[in-house]
Amino acid sequence: MDHRHCAAVLAATLLTGAAPADDAGLQPFSAHYGAYWKSITVGSSDLKLQPDTAPGHYVYTWTITAHGIFKIVYSKPVTQKSWLLVAGGHARPLKYHGDDGDAAVDLDFDWDKGRAHGASEGKPVDLVLKDGTQDVMSIQIEVMQDLRNGTLPATFQIIDKDELKDFNYTREGTARLHTDLGELDTIVVASQRTGNNRILRMWFAPALGFLPVQAERTRDGKLEFAMRIQSLDR
């Protein structure tokens, strides 16, 4: 997994207006994070959740930008975007776009026919959708909703590029974090692909609408990549 994809999973391994009454807890936001690779500052990351044109529809965008000498390798921002429907306390992806500057992934979710179509790095994609399938961005909205409702399942199926992958999710407990926004009580959630030795942990703050305020990816217990919140605009 390359650095850009790692960052995508983190952001993508991380959220809304008018909304249906049962989803009133969602609020539009724009959050700014510092991005770190093995404790070295490599750039910044921005997450933005905003209402789309129809009630219950939202657009969730993530952008990461390299800083300093890292711009030599990653000269263009990495962008991920998910168009989704939130209803009944759950998120359902409708469309996804990812672009790392060199290659792109585009997916359309046809829930009536139960298939996801598109292209991943120039290769066609045609996958069977299962109930609850997410893309690498919409999964964060779903986890936020599940934490709010107290219904986080143990396993999710997520489309990553051209594959449908199983990820195990574990609610590990609570932690109080010192952040640039102040002291925050958080819920810690770990995710791990079946058979993979990498673990992604995210810290969600209930006081901020279950916004993720920190994320760390480790491999064999060693920190590889992290994101930590620096500012928030609602």
Image (cartoon, rainbow, N blue to C red):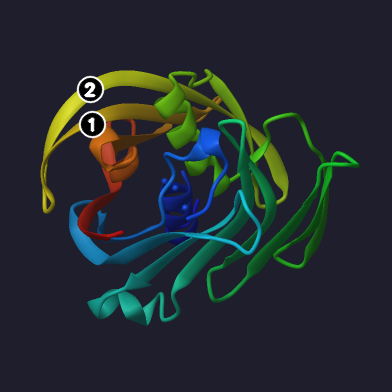
Amino acid type of the residue that numbered disc 1 sits on in the rendered structure: Thr
Which residue does the image show at 54% across and 47% down from the upper left?
19
Residues at marks 2 and 1, CA–CA distance in whole angstroms: 6 Å
- Between 160 and 145, which is closer to the camera in this rendering? 145
Q: Amino acid at mark 2?
A: Thr
Determine contact: label 2, label 1, CB under 8 Å: yes
Q: Give the SS element for disc 1.
A: strand
Q: Position of residue 115 (x, y in %)?
A: 85, 43
Q: Residue at x 45, y 79 (%)?
A: 76
User: Observer-nearest residue: 188 or 193?
Assistant: 188
Question: Residue visible at 39% across and 76% down?
Answer: 73
* Label annotation for residue 186: 1
Q: Is residue 12 above or below residue 174?
A: below
- In-front residue for pair 119/173: 173
Image position of 161 with respect to 193: above or below: below
Query: Which residue position is annotated with label 2?
Result: 174
Tell whether 109 sits left or right of 136: right
- Under circle 2, the secondary element is strand
User: Hey, which quadrant is residue 72 in on the image?
Assistant: bottom left
Q: What residue is at 41 percent from the left and 75 percent from the top?
A: 74
Q: Which picture quadrant has residue 59?
A: bottom right
Q: Answer few, some or many: residues within 10 Å of disc 1's Cα (few below 14, many 20 plus, some between 14 and 19).
A: many
Label 2 packing within 10 angstroms: few (<14), some (14-19), many (20+): some
